[in-house]
Amino acid sequence: MLASGFYDVAPGKVATVVTHLEMTKQANPRPVPEPEGVKLEQVDPTVDWYRDLYRRVGGQDWLWFARIGMSDEELSEILRDSGVEVYAMIKDGVAEGYLELDYRIDSECELAYFGVTPVLLGSGAGRYLMNAAIRLAWQKPIKRFHVHTCTLDHPDALGFYRRSGFTPYRQQIEIADDPRLAGQLAMDAGRRIPIIR
Ligand SMILES: CC(C)(COP(=O)(O)OP(=O)(O)OC[C@H]1O[C@@H](n2cnc3c(N)ncnc32)[C@H](O)[C@@H]1OP(=O)(O)O)[C@@H](O)C(=O)NCCC(=O)NCCS
């Protein structure tokens, strides 16, 4: 555990506060009209399809990098695992959002990834997707549904998760190589987060 105080972050790194949240019984859905022209379907993603959607959801404004730095083999192993399910939100034939459920730990489900692209942001599709995530996760005999969000995500993600019925129970600081300087994301990605060389 770190003592109270300020800590230097090395140049070339990004620091983020990670909040872990959980629900231990199925939360009620929050009513929202079904988004027009959008359907949700389970997909069996290839690595290329997945990376493209991952980047469009989180790789421009929100500095998602974890799955970009992963090798194709590592990512493919996760996506092929029978304990991992991916559901995509399709609009006009194109995936514009997704949720990933990870049941690889017995009696638990992690909402491993969740989000929509700028095409659907603020349209009610995120709430519709969360109602589906909660319903799908609790169809299995789990005791706990959990998720984490960090300060690189959309600033309302934490509030959105709390309104969804998740309760924060743990915080961490993560320090990582800045994915823009590492060449994994565009230099103009995640503009809110300064690049310190
Ligand atoms: C987190 C995220 C999914 C939230 O989605 P969003 O697009 O902001 O949310 P929505 O527009 O669907 O819903 C927000 C609220 O507006 C309401 N709303 C939006 N459109 C509406 C409509 N047409 N009619 C009625 N209500 C509407 C929703 O019901 C919801 O209310 P509630 O939260 O009080 O239940 C989104 O910010 C996102 O994908 N961000 C990028 C990726 C990210 O950071 N993911 C989180 C990683 S941990």
Image (spheres, helix red, strand yellow):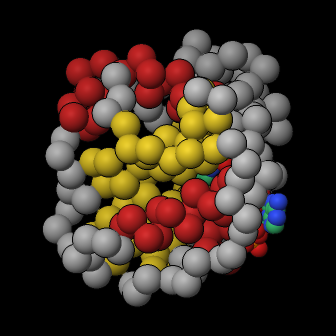
**Residue 50, located in which quarter of the rendered image?**
top left
Q: In which quarter of the image is the N terminus?
A: bottom left
**Residue 136, located in which quarter of the rendered image?**
bottom left
Q: x, y percentage for residue 105? A: 20, 62
Q: x, y percentage for residue 29? A: 58, 78
Side (left or right) of 70 relative to 14: left
Q: Ligand 1 quadrant?
A: bottom right
- Whether residue 69 is visible, yes or no, is no
Residue that extends furthest to the top in the rendered view of this protein: 183
**Residue 18, located in which quarter of the rendered image?**
bottom right
Q: x, y percentage for residue 59? A: 63, 29
Numbered-mark total: 0
Q: x, y percentage for residue 13? A: 61, 32
- Whether residue 31 is visible, yes or no, is yes
**Residue 17 versus residue 64: which sits nearer the camera?**
64
Residue drawn at x 31%, y 19% as measured from the top left:
72
**Residue 48 versus residue 132: which sits nearer the camera?**
132
Q: Is residue 135 above or below residue 114?
A: below
Q: In which quarter of the image is the C terminus?
A: top right
Residue drawn at x 79%, y 52% as measured from the top left:
123
Side (left or right) of 156 relative to 78: right
Side (left or right) of 102 relative to 154: left
Residue drawn at x 47%, y 70% as measured from the top left:
134
Residue drawn at x 57%, y 63% as measured from the top left:
130
Q: In this view, does 124 lie above or below 197?
A: below
Residue that extends furthest to the front in the rendered view of this protein: 37
